[in-house]
Image: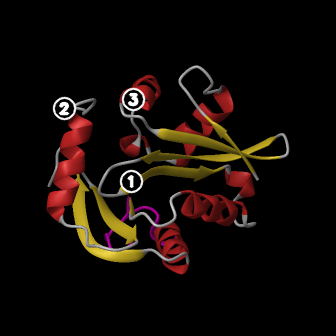
């Protein structure tokens, strides 16, 4: 699988379509804002290809204390055949030796519209060396859980720190933290 670094100028319609369909709308930063953030926040926005075929993308926010795996998506018709595993393996290798954190829709939130999907995703990350930190944050009606790989711990203070960093660049007024 080959990688291509994405900038605001090279982001294309296939990447945008996957972004807008892979994540619930309330988890998305508006596309134009996301493109602006690529440079402002020095995001590692990478697209993955199998030959010429676009497979998926990742967006990582590299930080001093940990790298935040912000977005990870594989085209729907390619899910379940190892492509996501290949991408995650490459991503883990890229950030080898560094603590990495991700947040995902909590598999413990009840009720929720997609419990089986959340459980499968949680299991996927556990099988790949992440651990559940038991740190949760709710926004509107969505509860997120934090998983991490590497040394250290993750606390609500860490969550607040990264949220405050993001707020320097972008934050919707209607998003209410609980």
Vertical placement of residue 39 versus 23, above or below: above
Q: Which type of secondary structure does the marked residue at label 3 adopt?
A: helix
Q: Earlier in the sequence, mark 1 or mark 2?
A: 1
Q: Residue at x 55, y 75 (%)?
A: 128
Residue that label 3 marks:
37
**Structural distance between the alpha carbons of marks 1 and 2:** 23 Å
Residue 53 horizontal side relative to residue 170, left or right: right
Quadrant of res 99? bottom left
Q: Which residues are magenta?
A: 104-116
How far across and down, in percent of the image, does residue 1 sit? 76, 53
**Structural distance between the alpha carbons of marks 3 and 2:** 17 Å
Vertical placement of residue 36 versus 86, above or below: above
Q: Earlier in the sequence, mark 3 or mark 2?
A: 3
Q: Residue at x 50, y 72 (%)?
A: 125
Disc sitting over residue 173 in the figure:
2
How far across and down, in percent of the image, does residue 42 sit? 41, 34
Quadrant of res 7? top right
Residue that label 1 marks:
68
Front position among marks 1 and 2: 1
Q: Residue at x 72, y 60 (%)?
A: 83
């Amino acid at each position: 699988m080959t990688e291509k670094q994405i900038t605001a100028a090279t982001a294309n319609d296939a990447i945008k379509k996957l972004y807008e369909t892979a994540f619930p709308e309330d988890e998305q930063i508006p596309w134009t804002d996301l493109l602006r953030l690529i440079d402002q926040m020095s995001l590692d926005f990478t697209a993955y290809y199998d030959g010429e075929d676009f497979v998926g993308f990742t967006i990582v926010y590299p930080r001093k204390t940990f790298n935040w795996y912000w977005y990870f998506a594989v085209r729907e018709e390619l899910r379940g055949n190892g492509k996501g595993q290949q991408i995650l393996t490459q991503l883990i290798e890229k950030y080898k030796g560094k603590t990495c954190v991700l947040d995902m829709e909590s598999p413990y939130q009840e009720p929720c519209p997609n419990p089986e999907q959340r459980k499968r995703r949680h299991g996927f990350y556990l099988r790949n060396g992440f651990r559940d930190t038991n740190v949760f944050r709710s926004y509107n009606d969505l509860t997120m859980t934090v998983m991490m790989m590497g040394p250290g711990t993750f606390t609500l203070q860490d969550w607040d720190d990264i949220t405050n960093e993001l707020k320097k660049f972008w934050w919707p007024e209607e998003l209410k933290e609980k």
